[in-house]
Image (cartoon, rainbow, N blue to C red):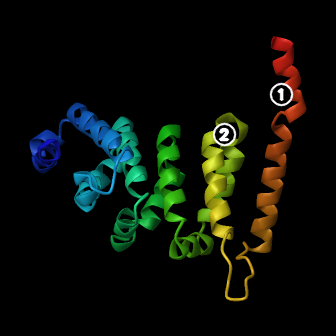
Amino acid sequence: SLFQVVVLMFEHKQLCSSLPLMKVVMALLGNLSYHVVHTSILLQNQTQVMTFIMPFITSDNVAIGRVASHVLSNLTRSKDGRDYVEEHNLLDRLVCLVAAVSDADMVYYLLGSLVNLSNEVKHRKYFRSTKTVTWLINAVKYYGPADWEIASLSCQVLWNCCNETDDNGEYKTLEIKTATNVAEVLTAYIETCPHQDDVADSENSDE
């Protein structure tokens, strides 16, 4: 099968050293993992796939890292994929990586993984207890209106971190200083966005 051919490529060290070939293979896995269904061979073997792709995410070749991050983002939509990240102690590594890379597309895909991971209570707790929240706030501040997709994914993780209640039905909250910082950044962000009336006027003037 096609998947077996891909496995053989990853297991062959000489082939893995060919970056152009690996880029094509990663792109193939990206497409297959995006349209994955419960009965697919990729989902059934996704632990093996994740073992293969993780070294490429930290590759010096940005193009390879980008497509590998895309595959990771797709696979962490499933619980098995999220469990793999936890079992192999990769959560901290991913957070550090998303804060360190400069390629916008790679940041976008890595943030997609964090969004998926933040759907689980244990990971939200980790994000709240580390510098992850601070980085997310800085991401919104840095990317802002210039890249609304990255900013919105950062906001989604922040939202997930707060969208949880304790035994008394009270929502989990960020520390007061952090929450204030979030509010200030988002307020400034909203003020830079065009108002709905302004957008409507602009569209009408183009007609």
**Can residue 195 be seen?**
no
Residue sitting at x 13%, y 43%: 9
Question: Residue pushed farthest top?
Answer: 207
Does residue 130 appear in the picture of this structure? Answer: yes
Q: Is residue 47 above or below residue 147?
A: below
Residue 198, given in percent of the width and then of the height, sits at: 88, 28
Q: Is residue 156 left or right of residue 40?
A: right
Q: Residue at x 18, y 35 (%)?
A: 18
Q: Give the x, y percent position of residue 70.
A: 40, 45
Residue 199's label in the rendered image is 1
Q: Amino acid at mark 1?
A: Val
Q: Is residue 47 above or below residue 152?
A: below
Q: Is residue 61 left or right of residue 196?
A: left
Task: State the quadrant of the C terminus.
Answer: top right
Residue located at (35% from left, 45% from top): 68
Give me the residue at 81% from left, 58% from top.
183
Q: Nearer the viewer, residue 79 or 191?
A: 79
- Quadrant in the picture for residue 196: top right
Q: Is residue 132 left or right of residue 7?
A: right
Report the residue that reaches farthest toward the bottom: 167
- Res 16 → quadrant: top left
Label 1 element class: helix
**170 relative to 155 in the view: left or right:** right
Residue holding disc 2? 148
**Gap in Å between the C-alphas at discs 1 and 2?**
16 Å
Which of the marked residues, 1 or 2, is nearer the chain's N terminus? 2
Q: Give the quadrant of the N terminus.
A: top left
Residue type indicated by callout 2: Trp
Q: Secondary structure at mark 2?
A: helix
Tell me if residue 190 comes above or below residue 117 in the rendering: above
Q: Nearer the viewer, residue 13 or 147?
A: 147
